[in-house]
């Protein structure tokens, strides 16, 4: 078998690759919308979308009930899952490139937990910043995400100046546990049920509606654009910060910019869905395996694959033990944790050679 | 091109620069040397803008380096890192393309046609074109180095800084890389600043060297001046010897390991001599530093085996003769690398030897002599057209147990030659063509071999203790050998 190493990316290959990603995403959305407690045939789903988008009449009769389920309940949920998945995946890709650490993602770095603290505080203490209204929630999450990242990196640097892969992850996990405990404590003190706490910690995109989609959307767009504009900087920084500086990257500014963009994406995702782990870890690896590590393509592809992945994961979470629902984080962790272990193993084997 | 003025700074206490000043001209190959911890890398990082000087200024093309934006700096200075590692598997082409970063202006950093052309050029130049779709983790250390060289060249810099460029490379690519860079500096396209660990490589390639010592400039000058023994002793704290490069006028330094040698053992005894009709051979228990005119192992070198071989007829070529000699040496169980062979056409019975021991040195001389083709050296021109029918050779071996300076070797040769001429004069040996007193045969050989232990012998001129003995013995032995019939 020819090894997948000589990925000569011709224009045609790239075009086909992006076509494939688009098809997968479209399929995920349609399947995600069609399956549920009431199964709606794919054909009907497509016609409902068609009529809604074009305003034309369609050859079959559409049940008003189905249309309602799709447009007000399932579609916002699917879109939200997609946006959250896309945000986490692209943020993960960026963190991995920036820290030259294949195990980095918002969850393992503790950034998700930081964002959760911000979100939980906002929700349970009903904080509302003046002027920001609905955006108080993501804003506080983002700020906490950013602060957590600064603290984690600062602490990791204290431990080991060279910022080894393991040091960062260990620091991230320590902070993650601590912040998780803090969240549990906060929720318990407000007298809520423990089930809800677990729900928060493992993440969910259910019962959020279009308002949550509107909350995450602007942050997703901003963060993704910022990262994609720095794709080449990420490529260069993968060879080390000093080397990047030699090649002409203004390392300090770019690094800060990438960290802010990553925090925006993570914070906004956590604000609407809680902490969903391992998406940012698994997706970029999968894409690198397919087309190589060039961030110019890795970042946009992460958006496609991340969103498709989380839509399907969400579908599983609500159908596996239907009518009850699993937290979506259970599904992602079931897939992500073994992959994490695998990457770590490979990393160590390579290091020992 | 680059001016460093009173620069101090660095990180921590350990690797600091103090008040460093120097300039590098356009098109220069500039070397930075110094022991570990002398601040070489710190200095390189300051020149490439990674560390800002605390005091003093660095000017690049008359502009303060602090005033350069990162991209502008990268268009002027490129750095070839010792080794750049990444956990991601970029292809060679992708890696090299990153070198174009400073030249890109559009926000999504797409490569232009011009970028692609330059990438193709540098890939060709570094012989990495055929590897362009391989990932860098599949390459050897030398190939990786070439990829990063290509990346640095893709920056189209005017200055390239190298931190111990030859560290991970095998010999052939070290030379290839340095020759390549040297070529560019000669064409004035590029200024090269390189940190070297190896003083000899630095001496070979650099136009000037900066010797750092504890963060200060010890000396900055041409390599031959920087590599003086006193500088090396002061900075590296060790004695070195000098020798000259055989091909180019560059100084090389060598270390002399401590060696133990018994001083009392008598090295030269007649037991070590073997006589046959075909050869006279002498085996020394230790290698001797030898300067000789022989055609096999001649020039200077260290040898243990000395063979004076009888060759009856003129061989077609020297090569053929040497080939046959190698077979002879193998028969004798001698490694050809360890041997010097002189040839003679004179019956080996015409020989004489003598040994003398003084408190300063021991001397052992072996002569074989025949004068059938004696020539007066002052009228050598008259022999140009002559058909050589008869052959004669005087081979003189002089073994000395003592430590001779290089010039004493030459003096020993002069003294021995003068003694030979005198012997021929006294024997009334005539040049047959000119009927004048002959001075020797054109095929004569002389060999001086010394143990290089014990007392240093400064001179071997005809009035010195050693020289006088050589003169006297050689004179007597040649006379004696000629009379052996």
Image: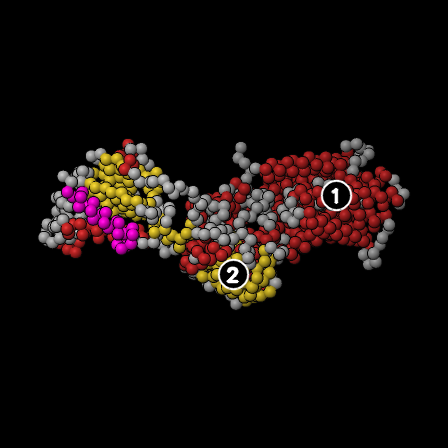
Q: Does residue B304 appear in this view?
A: no
Q: Find the residue positioned furthest to the right.
A: A191
Q: Separation of disc 1 and disc 2 at Cα?
A: 48 Å
Callout 1–callout 2 Cβ contact below 8 Å? no
Number of marks in the rendered image: 2
The C terminus of chain B - image quarter: top left
Q: Are marks 1 and 2 on the same chain?
A: no
> Is residue B178 shown above or below B62?
above
Q: Is residue B69 magenta?
A: no
Q: Quadrant of residue A167?
A: top right
Q: Residues within 10 Å of mark 2 (few under 14, many from 20)?
A: many
Residue B8 makes an appearance in the image: yes
- The crowd level at tag 1 (other Cα within 10 Å; few <14, some 14-19, many 20+) is some
User: Can you identify the residue that label 2 sits on?
Assistant: B217
* Horizontal and vertical percent position of residue B446: 25, 47
Q: Which mark is residue A174?
A: 1
Dot 1: element: helix
In the displayed structure image, the side of residue A262 where residue B469 appears, left or right: left
- Of badges 1 and 2, nearer the viewer stands 2
Q: Residue at x 35, y 41 (%)?
A: B287
Residue range (magenta): B461-483
Residue A281: percent from the left, percent from the top?
A: 68, 42
Left or right of A91 on screen, residue A271: right
The residue at 65%/56% (across/down) is A252
The subunit carrying tag 1 is A
- Residue closest to the eye, B246 or A188: B246
A240 left or right of B207 in image: right
Q: Is residue B474 magenta?
A: yes
């Amino acid at each position: 078998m020819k090894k997948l190493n000589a990925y000569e990316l011709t224009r045609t290959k790239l075009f086909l690759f992006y076509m494939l990603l688009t098809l997968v995403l479209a399929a995920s959305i349609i399947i995600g919308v069609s399956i549920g407690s009431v199964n709606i045939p794919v054909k009907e789903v497509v016609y409902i979308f068609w009529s809604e988008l074009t305003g034309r009449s369609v050859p079959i009769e559409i049940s008003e009930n189905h249309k309602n389920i799709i447009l007000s309940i399932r579609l916002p949920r699917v879109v939200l899952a997609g946006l959250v998945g896309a945000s986490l995946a692209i943020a993960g890709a960026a963190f991995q490139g920036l820290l030259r650490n294949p195990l980095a993602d918002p969850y393992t770095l503790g950034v998700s937990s930081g964002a959760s603290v911000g979100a939980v505080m906002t929700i349970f203490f009903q904080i509302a910043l003046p002027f920001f209204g609905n955006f108080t929630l993501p804003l506080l999450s983002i700020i906490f995400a950013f602060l957590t990242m600064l603290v984690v990196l600062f602490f990791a640097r204290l431990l080991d100046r060279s910022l080894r892969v393991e040091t960062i992850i260990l620091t991230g996990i320590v902070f993650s546990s601590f912040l998780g405990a803090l969240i549990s404590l906060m929720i318990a003190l407000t007298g809520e049920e423990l089930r809800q706490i677990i729900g928060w910690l493992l993440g969910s995109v259910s019962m959020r509606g279009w308002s949550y989609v509107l909350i995450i959307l602007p942050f997703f767009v901003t963060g993704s654009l910022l990262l994609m504009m720095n794709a080449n900087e990420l490529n260069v920084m993968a060879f080390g910060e000093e080397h990047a500086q030699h090649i002409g990257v203004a390392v300090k500014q770019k690094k800060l910019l990438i960290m802010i963009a990553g925090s925006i994406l993570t914070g906004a995702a956590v604000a609407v869905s809680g902490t969903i782990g391992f998406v940012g870890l698994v997706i970029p690896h999968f894409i690198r395996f397919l087309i190589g590590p060039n961030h110019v393509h890795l970042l946009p592809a992460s958006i496609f694959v991340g969103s498709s992945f989380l839509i399907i994961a969400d579908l599983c979470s609500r159908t596996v033990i239907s009518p009850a629902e699993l937290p979506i984080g259970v599904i992602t962790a079931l897939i992500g944790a073994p992959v994490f272990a695998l990457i770590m193993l490979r990393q160590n084997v390579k290091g020992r050679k | 091109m680059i001016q460093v003025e009173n620069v101090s700074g660095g990180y921590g206490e350990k690797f600091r620069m103090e008040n460093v000043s120097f300039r590098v001209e356009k098109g220069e190959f500039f070397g930075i040397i110094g022991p570990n911890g002398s601040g070489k890398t710190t200095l390189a990082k300051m020149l490439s803008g990674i560390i800002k000087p605390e005091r003093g200024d660095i000017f690049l093309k008359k502009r303060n380096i602090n005033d350069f934006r990162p991209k502008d700096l990268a268009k002027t200075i490129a750095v070839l890192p010792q080794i750049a590692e990444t956990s991601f598997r970029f292809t060679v082409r992708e890696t090299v393309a990153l070198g174009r970063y400073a030249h890109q202006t559009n926000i999504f950093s797409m490569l232009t046609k011009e970028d692609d052309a330059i990438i193709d050029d540098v890939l060709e130049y570094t012989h990495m074109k055929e590897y362009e779709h391989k990932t860098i983790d599949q390459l050897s250390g030398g190939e990786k180095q070439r990829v990063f060289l290509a990346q640095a060249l893709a920056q189209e810099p005017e200055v390239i800084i190298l931190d111990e460029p030859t560290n991970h490379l095998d010999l052939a690519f070290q030379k290839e890389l340095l020759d390549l860079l040297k070529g560019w500096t000669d064409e004035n396209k590029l200024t090269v600043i390189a940190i070297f660990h190896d003083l000899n490589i630095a001496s070979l390639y650099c136009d000037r060297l900066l010797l750092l010592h504890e963060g200060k400039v010890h000396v900055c000058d041409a390599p031959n001046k920087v590599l003086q023994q006193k500088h090396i002793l002061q900075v590296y704290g060790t004695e070195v010897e000098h020798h000259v490069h055989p091909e180019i006028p560059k100084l090389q330094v060598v270390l002399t390991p401590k060696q133990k040698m018994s001083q009392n053992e008598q090295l030269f005894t007649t037991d070590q001599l073997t006589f046959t009709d075909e050869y006279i051979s002498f085996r020394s228990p230790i290698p001797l530093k030898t300067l000789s005119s022989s055609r096999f192992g001649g020039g200077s070198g260290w040898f243990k085996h000395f063979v004076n071989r009888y060759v009856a007829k003129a061989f077609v070529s020297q090569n053929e003769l040497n080939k046959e000699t190698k077979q002879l040496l193998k028969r004798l169980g001698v490694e050809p690398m360890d041997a010097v062979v002189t040839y003679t056409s004179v019956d080996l019975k015409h020989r004489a030897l003598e040994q003398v021991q003084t408190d300063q040195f021991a001397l052992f001389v072996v002569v074989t002599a025949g004068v059938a083709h004696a020539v007066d050296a002052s009228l050598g021109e008259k022999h140009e057209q002559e058909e050589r029918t008869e052959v004669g050779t005087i081979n003189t071996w002089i073994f000395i147990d003592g430590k001779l300076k290089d010039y004493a070797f030459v003096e020993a040769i002069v003294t021995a030659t003068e003694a030979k001429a005198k012997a021929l004069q006294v024997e009334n040996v005539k040049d047959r063509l000119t009927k004048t007193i002959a001075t020797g045969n054109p095929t004569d050989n002389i060999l001086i071999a010394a143990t290089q232990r014990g007392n240093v012998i400064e001179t071997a001129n005809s009035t010195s203790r050693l020289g006088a003995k050589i003169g006297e013995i050689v004179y007597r032995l040649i006379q004696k050998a000629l009379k052996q019939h």
